[in-house]
Image (cartoon, helix red, strand yellow):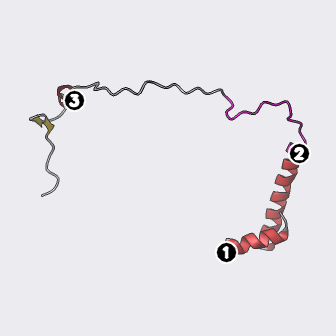
Amino acid sequence: MNKEVLIRLEKLNQLRLTDEQEAATLAFFDEREAEMTALDAIDTTDVVRMVHVMPLENVLREDVASQPFTREALQAGAPAAEDGYWQVPRTVD
């Protein structure tokens, strides 16, 4: 990053950086660029590409419709039920 790009970004983001902040920002991006240059210098031609550090496997089950609970079993835990429906306190008058 250079000073012109930084000025354009300041205008775009409606910022005003002090001279010290500009110098610190430019130094920060210069360090990142040096790090990227060092990483680019590493020969990775024989390295296998990977997405995850650990191998992942999806465990899928059959998509089968089922009814694991009966209405009576679910209503057994209800505070009140009548005619197959839960009874709840009135919330709106």
Q: Position of residue 48 (x, y in %)?
A: 78, 30
Q: Is residue 70 left or right of residue 83?
A: right
Q: Position of residue 7 (x, y in %)?
A: 78, 73
Q: Identify the secondary structure beneath mark 2.
A: helix
Q: Residues within 10 Å of mark 1 (few under 14, many from 20)?
A: few
Q: Quadrant of residue 64?
A: top left
Among the two numbered marks 2 and 1 on one chain, the one whose residue lies closer to the N terminus: 1
Q: Between marks 2 and 3, how big is the CA–CA gap?
A: 63 Å
Q: Is residue 1 above or below residue 11?
A: above
Q: Identify the secondary structure beneath mark 1.
A: loop
Q: Residues within 10 Å of mark 2 (few under 14, many from 20)?
A: few
**Magenta span contains residue 43:** yes
* Magenta portion: prevailing SS class: loop
Which label was assigned to residue 74?
Answer: 3
Which label was assigned to residue 14?
Answer: 1
Q: Residue at x 31, y 26 (%)?
A: 66
Q: Identify the secondary structure beneath mark 3.
A: helix
**Magenta span contains residue 12:** no
Q: Amino acid at mark 3?
A: Leu
Q: Is residue 20 visible?
A: no
Q: Is residue 60 visible?
A: yes
Q: Residue at x 65, y 26 (%)?
A: 55
Numbered marks: total:
3
Q: Quadrant of residue 85?
A: top left
Q: Which residue is mark 2?
A: 38
Q: Residue at x 84, y 70 (%)?
A: 3
Q: Amino acid at mark 2?
A: Ala
Q: Residue at x 58, y 26 (%)?
A: 57
Q: Which residues are magenta?
A: 39-54
Q: Amino acid at mark 1?
A: Gln
Q: Nearer the viewer, residue 52 or 78?
A: 52
Q: Is residue 35 left or right of residue 68?
A: right
